[in-house]
Amino acid sequence: MTPLSKSKAKYIKSLQLKKSREKEHRFIVEGNKSVLEFLSSNFIVEEVVGTEEFYAEMNNNLLPPSNYTCNSKTLSTLGTFKTNNSALAIVQFNEQGPLNIDKKEVVLALDEINDPGNLGTIIRVADWYGVKKLLLSKNSVDVYNPKVVSATKGSLTRVDVYYTDLPQSMADYEGEVYAADMEGTSLSELNPIDSGIILMGSESHGVSHSLNSYITKRITIPRKGGAESLNVAVAAGIICNHLLS
């Protein structure tokens, strides 16, 4: 293992910025579990930085050609974690092919989701319920933001994320489009589904008006208390649990 240099540390820190990630087509993955998930996935892990303890427990067959060592204090300065005593990986963007939605699958679509934690959690929810594709409006938060990657807990390796022109994608789709809406049909009145697009909008604005004509069914979570709204990630989990269980 090679000791981590100052220049390499500076490069890794730069990947916290979206402009650097887009320039390099690389992003960082932090923490033991997430690094191991990416090492075992179809993502290309280019480099790993880890503590001696991490490498001592590691299966060397999974490691990339370039590996660096540093102590946990230094490791914690490279990413967004307050403490990281195991590892960090530099991973190449996973370039997607053309979007193709099968008529027999369920897809999640997110319109103007800007909070990294919410997006990461929704990707994890999608993975839990077996949803393989996630559509994002082009103005949504960057999926390779370190906070998004961290919140997915490795689920990003199993859910394909597409940034797309949502109105165009909806126009090309011939199945049902279910949109979360405060005035929609109660989930309690709906049966589970085995195909369709589940569309979620932002907490502050809901689904964009440009998507209204493509919605075939507006759905809502029954409210019994006084809360004005639900966190979008929580709402996605509840809707998926009802429609996909």
Image: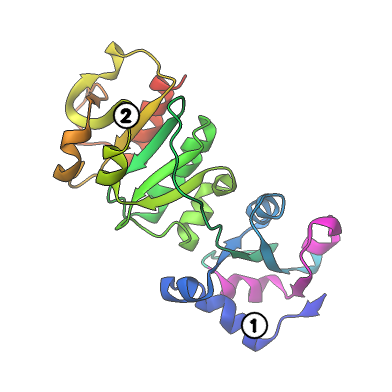
Q: From which residue to which does the magenta span run?
A: 54-79
**Image coordinates for residue 170, horizontal then vertical, percent:** 29, 38
Residue 66 quadrant: bottom right
**Image coordinates for residue 84, horizontal then vertical, percent:** 63, 64
Q: Is residue 198 left or right of residue 81?
A: left
**Quarter placement of the N terminus:** bottom right
- Residue beneath label 2, please? 174
Q: Which residue: 53% across, 37% down?
A: 127
- Residue beneath label 1, please? 8
Front-lying residue, 239 or 83: 239
Residue neighbourhood size for the residue with mark 1, other residues' Cα within 10 Å, grouped as few (<14), some (14–19), many (≥20): some
Q: Which residue: 68% across, 70% down?
A: 72
Q: Which residue: 75% across, 68% down?
A: 51
Taking the magenta stretch, the answer to whether it contains residue 63 is: yes
Q: Is residue 240 left or right of residue 80?
A: left
Three-letter amino acid code at the position of disc 2? Glu
